[in-house]
Amino acid sequence: MQRTAKLALEDGIVFSGAAFGAEGEVDGEVCFNTSMTGYQEILTDPSYRGQIVAMTYPQIGNYGVNAEDVESARPQLAGFVVRERSRRVSNFRADGDLNGYLKQWGVVGIEGIDTRRLVRRLRTEGAMKGVLSTNELDDRRLVERAKASPGLVGRDLVREVVPEGPIEWTDPLSPWAKLQALSMEPAAAADRPHVVALDYGMKWNIARHLFSVGCRVTILPGTATADEVLSYEPDGVFLSNGPGDPEPLDYAQQTIRDLLGRRPIFGICLGHQLLSLACGAKTYKLKFGHRGANQPVLNHRTGRVEITTQNHGFAVAADSLPDELETTHLNLNDETIEGVRHCEYPAFSVQYHPEASAGPHDSDYLFAEFRAMLG
């Protein structure tokens, strides 16, 4: 018998559909992702912590799940919303289905709702707080709980997803990846420059890229101080992606200030926002964020347009950029900043995800550029 689930938004709209995955009730910011594929990478991306994610593509789950296409040890989002869950798995790499995967990890899902109506509402009104439940089905109570939920602004979600201690990363990119940057790998492990990656909720494919372009990679929790980072004697420092609002992360901003000019720095997504904040810029919350594998970005240095995969709800304010930072990349949909470079120190960052997984590989060259900075 099909179970009932409901998704309630803080503005009073309630969607009723069929439950799949785990039973229970969760709250979070309701957002949407426009990718056609890559749902397992989305499920396991720590940047989605505290969010209920709706997929705009109408059928999700047709190629199943497997043990390789994950970006962390488990699903990280609060809940999952699809128009239709595929009952048939058709892919030679699959070792399970979406329903069983969500049930295994305790993730609540809902299908059968009008996702077009939901997404149009979020685009018009902005991302909203919501509650997804298979237990409580009273509309009024669900809306009240959505209104009372904490949301993302002002919360430190990074502490919920950072690793407990240092990790030496040695996994390369999948053999499916055919990237030019792989030709830079040195012959001997002893020749690899050492990169300390500050993990604020890092996707594993970032670490795979860093290793595969020829770096020795040590992952530290994003709460580490500059002294702790420097004690590993790195040749460069990487600032990872992660969930939520960057402004409350004072400890991370201070660490970056203390490292600027002492080691080359490369940041992605939350790492981009934190680098900008550390240099004196401001961030703000986007109306409904950028989430999908089809975002066009202009590279000012080359004049080329890169199609990128993105996942962020906050952005660096262009009118707050200090003189020491220059804009290197621009989003062509809304002209938000997608990349900066420090004018004095070897430090740069991008708002999008050049490591893809899933998504286009137009921007993987950035890992090679960082590797070249390390000598």
Image (tube, rainbow, N blue to C red):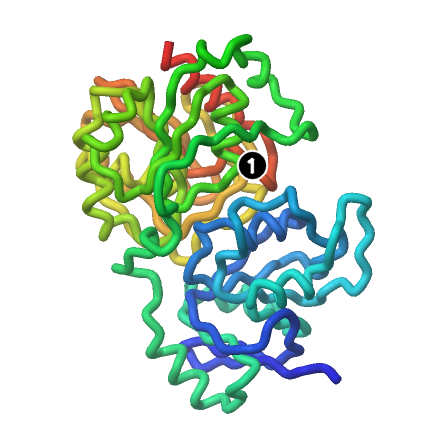
Residue 44 image point, x, y percent: 54, 51
The image quarter containing residue 318 is top left
Q: In the displayed structure, would residue 119 be above or below residue 341?
A: below
| x 76%, y 62%: residue | 86
- Residue in front for this viewpoint, 216 or 2: 216
Residue 77 image point, x, y percent: 49, 60
The image quarter containing residue 347 is top left
| x 19%, y 27%: residue | 323
Quadrant location, the C terminus: top left
Q: In this view, does 369 lie to the left or right of 177?
A: left
Q: In the displayed structure, would residue 255 be above or below residue 186?
A: below
The image quarter containing residue 106 is bottom right
Quadrant location, the N terminus: bottom right
Residue 342 image point, x, y percent: 26, 23
Residue 14 image point, x, y percent: 52, 81
| x 39%, y 81%: residue | 145
Residue 121 appears in the rendering: yes
Q: Name the residue under label 1.
A: 356
> Callout 1: few (<14), some (14-19), or many (20+) C-alpha neighbours within 10 Å?
many
Q: Which amino acid does label 1 sit on?
A: Ala
Residue 338 appears in the rendering: no
